[in-house]
Amino acid sequence: MFEAKYQTFDDAPGAAQCAPRVKALRTELARRGLTGFVVPHADCHQSEYLSASEERLAWLTGFTGSAGAAIVLMDRAALFVDGRYTLQAREQTDTSLFEIVHLVETPPDQWIERTLAKGDTLGFDPWLHTVEGAERLARACANAGATLVPIEPNPIDELWQDRPAAPLGAVTLHDIRFAGDAAETKLATLRPEIAKLKADALVVSDPHAIAWAFNIRGSDVSHTPLPLSFAIIPNEGRPSLFIDARKLGNDVRDRLEQLADVRTPADFAGALATLGKAGKTLRLDQSTAADALARTITGAGGKVTKGTDPIATLKAVKNPVEIEGAREAHRRDGAAMTRFLAWLDREAPKGKLTEIGAVEALETFRRETNLLRDVSFPTIAGAGSDGAIVHYRVTRRTDRVIAPNELFLIDSGGQYQDGTTDITRTVIVGEPSDEMRDRFTRVLKGHIAIATAVFPDGTSGAQLDSFARQSLWQAGIDFDHGTGHGVGSYLSVHEGPARISKLGTVPLKRGMILSNEPGYYKPGAYGIRIENLVLVTEGPAVSGAEKPLNAFETLTLAPIDRRLVQRDLLTIGEIAWLDAYHARVRTTLAPLVDAATKTWLDDATKPLA
């Protein structure tokens, strides 16, 4: 009945290939006179999701998560992952070769300082590390009496015999009906921002920023419509866009040539060197610019300033057209999600539905909108203990039936031209245990605390993060990931610079879209997460308020499983929020779904008894 189009369930190469590949890398490092090498999950744009040709970390270790790094020395190796991926890393890599290290608790620089010996030489590819990242590695090496050495070409590229070709996805124009502002307007807004930074030009290495500034989208990376490319935007004069011409149709090229000088990526380093020789000061985004870029500029005599790319904030604050597009995308996506949840409630109790079957069904319901361009990330669908793996990705090997009396966690999203969605629902198949209901309700309380927050303008995500954890902390439990991330407009489902997390120091501004997704994970048993996207809006009027207040508008529309709610753990206000949310879901989505789904929806959104 269902078939996945935008995602596959192939098994990763896994641990079996680790030993010969690590051995080959060590042989190559010895030939180059190196003690070790750093292998990040990165490309030259610092992308979260990589094209197949850039998956060096997965090739070496078997680990396929979207964040991590490895360090291979002659006598030991470490794989660094954050709390989302600790279980996945142990399953995918050879733990007899790789020590699994928590990326936050013991970052690579600390491990290097403790592990390297005096006289050691640690290699790194300067195209795969930011300037700040390279500086941290260099300091750690120096503190250990070792030396950090830039290496080109990358030794893994030399060893990877069947490496896929670089992508050549077609570039499309992002219509102003969805973008809201013309590219000329965006570039004009940018120029004074660049001048304020006392820079002659902005070097743009993040394809998300290029997509936004030039109103284009691409297909070089799975699930995120990115055109892999670089740009140089001066504070005066025409920008230069460095992009493979094979990606450009005639109409797209004509439009881009109205905006910029369109050049080949092979010209990019030379253009930076030319500006460097002219003594220009160039701005690099500290979070995405490769160390190689700074080396090229300063090596030619130029100056580099580092900091936030002004495009990041401009892009994060959605304009009115993008905001209304997000609302429309969520209505459409919510109807598809609700059709799926009703179907799941009918099918799962039969005892034959698998995790892959659920993923395929949900993707099909979204495709039936006829407006889905892709899923926004590979769907996370974990039954029982698989749900405890925060970023679990089901494969043919791991697929299993959703069993009776199990929790099923499904985290998914869609890419539509008018908006990007991301939603997680946790549902019970059968009867929940008292512990499941307690934990689910505590997660729900945290979700409601974020959804109803009213906060002064200038508040950061770090200041709100604990709201989502209070009820969990009271039970002596927590979750090991951020509460929320930024979301793009038909761009990345994980967008900076703002986030709701312990590390989220960027102020939340009206027009930003973020996720609200507290959770709880019991290893070997189950996982719980409740995720909606929220829009930062003007807060309610408060008499005597000394600062402007902001609040959140919940964009996501789909029922939350009432069967998992322990009513006596909720306050009167929390019950009122859930009932009002469900009333809004019912009113909005009922006209958009079929009769059978509407009947299910009416029951699923009834007020709490």
Image (cartoon, grey):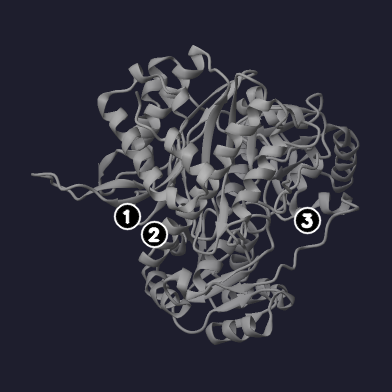
User: Could you say which quadrant of the image residue 492 lies in?
Assistant: bottom right
287 on left or right of 59 = left
> In this rendering, is residue 457 above or below 323?
above
Residue at the spot 82% in from the left edge and 61% down from the top edge = 165
444 relative position to 125: left or right: left
Residue nearer the viewer, 55 or 20: 55
The x, y position of residue 136, in whole percent, is 58, 43
Q: Residue 87 in the image: x percent, y percent? A: 67, 27
Regarding mark 2 in the picture, which secondary structure is present there? Answer: loop
Q: Which residue is at the far front?
A: 595
Q: Going from the N terminus, do you reach mark 3 or mark 2 first?
A: 3
What residue did someone put label 3 on?
Answer: 53
Tell me, for residue 510, which label it has, or none: 1
Q: Which residue is labeled 2 in the image? A: 317
Of the residues tagged 1 and 3, which is closer to the observer?
Answer: 1
On screen, 343 above or below 548? above
- Which-is-in-front pick, marks 3 and 2? 2
Q: Earlier in the sequence, mark 1 or mark 2?
A: 2
* Amino acid type at image mark 1: Arg
Q: Assign a secondary structure to mark 1.
A: loop
